[in-house]
Image (cartoon, rainbow, N blue to C red):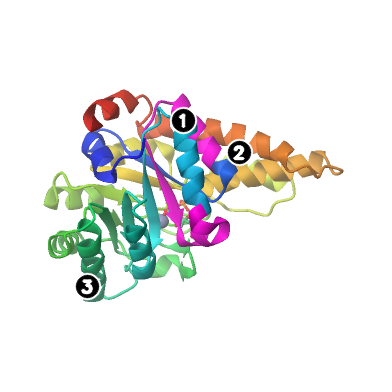
Amino acid sequence: MIVTTKQLFEVAYGEFAVGAYNINNAEQTVGLFRGCAESQAPFIIQISKGARKYTDKQILEGLIRSAAEVFPDNIFAVHLDHGDEEACYDCIDSGFYSSVMIDASHESFDGNIAATKRVVERAHAKGISVEAELGQLGGVEEDIKVDEKNAKLTDPAQAKEFVERTGCDSLACAIGTSHGAFKFSGSQGLHFDVIERIQKLLPCFPLVMHGSSSVPQDEVERINAAGGEMKGASGVNVKEYLPAAKKGVCKINIDTDGRLVWTRVHREFFRDHPDGFDFRKPGEIFINEYTKFIASRNELLGSAGQLEKVRAAVK
Ligand code: G3H
Ligand code: 13P
Ligand code: ZN
C-alpha cells in the first residue's frame, strides 16, 4: 500500500527512522520489497533523476505498482530523490509520488528558499509533501561533485528560518555525512550537536539524513579480493542510526551500500564462473543478498517490526 511520507513520519518521529532506499531496476525492487516484508518494516522508495532516465520513469512506476500487488501487506511511500524544479513538477503532475525532494542546496540561501517555495506551492496543492535541503554534503550526487572541504554543515538558526519561510515538510540537513563510498576521509564525522540544536529549534519537525550508507568493510574487502579497487572506502557507523532517529531524523537514505552488494555479487560470480553469461544467475544471488541487507538495515534503523503500528495509524 502506498501512503504519504507524512503518515510514515508521524509514526516514526523520535522513535525510529524509515529507510529510504533507491531503486533503478527490477532486481533492486524485488529485494527491497522482500527485505521489508521479512523485517515487517515500512519504507520509502527513492527514485533519482538518474534512475528515471536509466530504466525510464514509467517503467519504474509500473514496477512499483506491480510490486505493491505482489506484496499487498507492505506499506511504503514513493519519493523523488534530489530533484530539480523540472523533475519535481513532473513527479507532482504524475500523481504517483508521495513526496518530492527539491535540492536547491547549491543555490544561495535566498535562491534555495525561492525555489523550494515554488515547489511547495505546487506540491501542497496536490497533497504531496516536500523535502528540501540546507547546507552541503560532500561527495557526488547526480552531476554535482562537492569535495569535503567545501561541504557545509547546516546552520541551525538558518534551518529554522528556512522551514518557516518555505513551508517545506522535512529538511535534509548536512550533519557530517557525504554521498558515495568514501566518507569521512578527512575530519568529518556525524555531528550530533548540530542535529540536537536543529531539533531544539524545530521540535517535532522531520529531519532527513542523506549519505547514510555504512560501506561495510567486509563488502569492500570482498570486492577488492574479486578484482575491485575500492581502497579506503568507508561509511557511517550503523550504531549512529538509532541515536540520530531519536533526535528527529525520520528518514535515512541508503543507496551506495546496495550498489556495493551488487558489485560484490557480480564480481565474485564472474570470477568464479568465467564461462558464465546467464545474468539471471548472479541476479538471483543479488536479489537474495539484497533482501538480507535491507532486512538488516531496517533492524538497525528501528523500523523493523513497526509495520502493524503504521497500518493502524494509516487506516
Ligand atoms: O544521492 C544520490 C543517490 O545515491 C542517487 O544516485 O543520482 O546516481 O541515481 P544517482
Ligand atoms: P549514500 O551514498 O550514502 O548511500 O547516500 C544516498 C543518498 O543520500 C540518496 O539521496
Ligand atoms: Zn542524497
Query: Which quarter of the figure is the C terminus placed in?
Result: top left
User: Which marked residue is nearer to the observer: mark 3 or mark 2?
Assistant: 3
Which amino acid type is marked by label 2? Asp
Q: Residues within 10 Å of mark 1 (few under 14, many from 20)?
A: some
| Ligand 3 within 8 Å, label 3 CB | no
The magenta segment: 29-58
Q: Quadrant of residue 91?
A: bottom left
Q: Secondary structure at mark 2?
A: helix
Residue 104 vs residue 221: left or right? left
Camera-side residue: 133 or 194?
133
Horizontal and vertical percent position of residue 285? 67, 34
Whole-number angstrom distance, CA of label 1 to CA of label 3: 40 Å
Q: Quadrant of residue 5?
A: top left
Magenta segment includes 31: yes
Q: Find residue 218 and name its label.
A: 2
Q: Find residue 71 and name its label.
A: 1
